[in-house]
Amino acid sequence: MPQTVDHDLRRRQLTEATAQEIARVGLASVRLRDVARAAGWTTGALCYYFPEKRDLLLATFRARTEMAHARFEAAASAGGSMVRAKIEAVLPLDAERLVNWKVWLAFWGAAVGDADLAAEQRHRYEVFRKGLAEAVAHDQDVHVLAGGHSAEELGRVLATLLDGVAVQAVFAPDEWPASQQRRVVEGYLASLAPSSATASYGSHRRRTK
């Protein structure tokens, strides 16, 4: 009988290998033969799934964004603060999430002067900010965060804060371990939260480590 090929699995293997290569050598230095070797396939097999290098890079960018979303969904299903679940899913708190940020940052630079990549970046941020705003609105409704603030505006502020923390964590990891990243974000959220919500973050964080 002919062997059944799991094409989705092969694509995931190739985008995962590409993400690791981007994190290791940077976007401009990624070579298809190195990605294929790391994934355990030939360059020809890689090109069957991704005829152009650009196709592979875009698929990798999207795959890493989807991984962060899946992590958020898993954390949110445990209950507790939706904002904290979003934060835990996004910040580079471990090696896996650090790779996400290295991939995203590599695409930031590549998007300058590239209309297609810039559009991809805009779309990601629109989805990211909308997700944060929805999480803020949820936490306000259940009194984890105090009301009286625009959820959309707070979503924009949180996106900016998370970007700033993550960029510093990528380039100065010794100064920005997970505990410091959480401390900075928690300090901001404390100004928005009812007094009873402070303990909620600690319990949620322990469940999502």
Image (tube, helix red, strand yellow):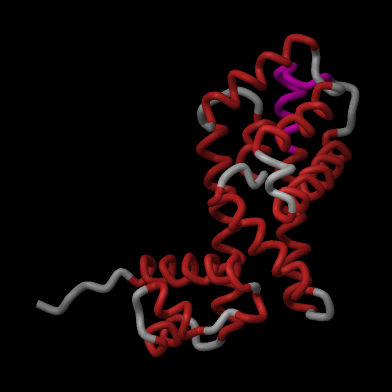
Q: Quadrant of residue 88?
A: top right
Residue 65, image x and y in percent? 61, 57
Q: Is residue 144 magenta?
A: yes
Q: Nearer the viewer, residue 32 or 135?
A: 32
Q: Nearer the viewer, residue 94 or 90?
A: 94
Please give left or right for residue 7 compared with residue 94 in the image: left
Q: Write down the region rendered in magenta.
A: 134-146
Outermost residue, top direction?
A: 196
Q: Quadrant of residue 115?
A: bottom right
Q: Nearer the viewer, residue 81 or 181?
A: 181
Q: Is residue 164 magenta?
A: no
Please give left or right for residue 167 compared with residue 148 in the image: left
Location of residue 125 with respect to 148 vertically, above or below: below
Outermost residue, front direction?
A: 174
Location of residue 64 with respect to 49 vertically, above or below: above
How many marks overall?
0
Identify the residue at image location x=81%, y=22%. 190
Q: Quadrant of residue 132?
A: top right
Majority secondary structure in the magenta region: helix
Q: Quadrant of the N terminus?
A: bottom left
Residue 37, image x and y in percent? 40, 79
Identify the residue at image location x=72%, y=42%. 176
Identify the residue at image location x=51%, y=38%. 74
Q: Nearer the viewer, residue 64 or 154?
A: 64
Please give left or right for residue 77 compared with residue 128 in the image: left
Identify the residue at image location x=60%, y=26%. 205
Residue 92, image x and y in percent? 64, 47
Residue 63, image x and y in percent? 54, 62
